[in-house]
Image (cartoon, grey):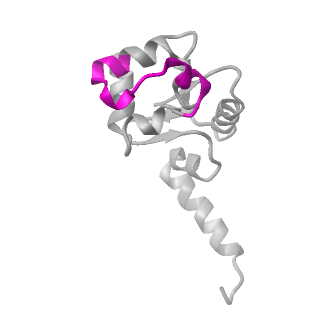
Amino acid sequence: MITLYSSASCTSCRKAHSWLEEHNIPFTEKNVFTEKITDQELKAILQLTENGTNEIISQRSQAFRDLNIAIDDMTLGEVLKLIQQHPGILRRPILIDDKRLLVGFNEEDIRCFLPRDIRKLELSKLHDQLPVNF
């Protein structure tokens, strides 16, 4: 099951929500401002990152800059608490299932959440549309 971590004011979150619905992909949505993200959820997200907190925290955001902290000097527990207290520092949307993580909305990258048989069918259709000399 896919979980979409979002916020109501985020355009990219609305795009991700619409894309999942259009492709009939079941998901649960969690608004990061109205529903607390648990330690377990944050750890699951961080386990799938390639760059740790740099991938999910927007260090250039005003919300993060206002905190005036050095996140690299913090323990995991401190980082989890920080995110829970200040969810506005998270990049959004965050889509996660048991194997994949996508931060932000990208029309190409989100396709990884399509079932394998549908991805193969779409690839086959694309291949059929290519010119013969390609």
Answer above or below: position of 122 versus 79: below
Residue 65 within the segment the image draws in magenta: yes
Q: Nearer the viewer, residue 7 or 22?
A: 7
Location of the C terminus by quadrant is: bottom right
Q: Nearer the viewer, residue 86 or 35?
A: 86
The residue that appears at 38% across and 28% down in the rendered structure is 71
Q: Position of residue 75 (x, y in %)?
A: 27, 23
Which secondary structure type mostly characterizes the magenta part of the structure?
helix
Q: Position of residue 93 (x, y in %)?
A: 58, 32
Start and end of the magenta stretch? Answer: 60-80
Residue 73 within the segment the image draws in magenta: yes
- The answer to which quarter of the image holds residue 104 is top right
Q: Nearer the viewer, residue 58 or 7?
A: 58
User: Which residue ends up furthest to the front in the rendered image?
Assistant: 68
User: Which residue ends up furthest to the bottom in the rendered image?
Assistant: 133
The residue that appears at 50% across and 18% down in the rendered structure is 67
Left or right: 79 in relation to 15: left
Q: Position of residue 88 (x, y in %)?
A: 56, 20
- The answer to which quarter of the image holds residue 46 is top left
Q: Report whether residue 134 is seen.
A: yes
The residue that appears at 57% across and 46% down in the rendered structure is 110
- The answer to which quarter of the image holds residue 4 is top right
Left or right: 96 in relation to 92: left
Q: Position of residue 56 (x, y in %)?
A: 47, 34
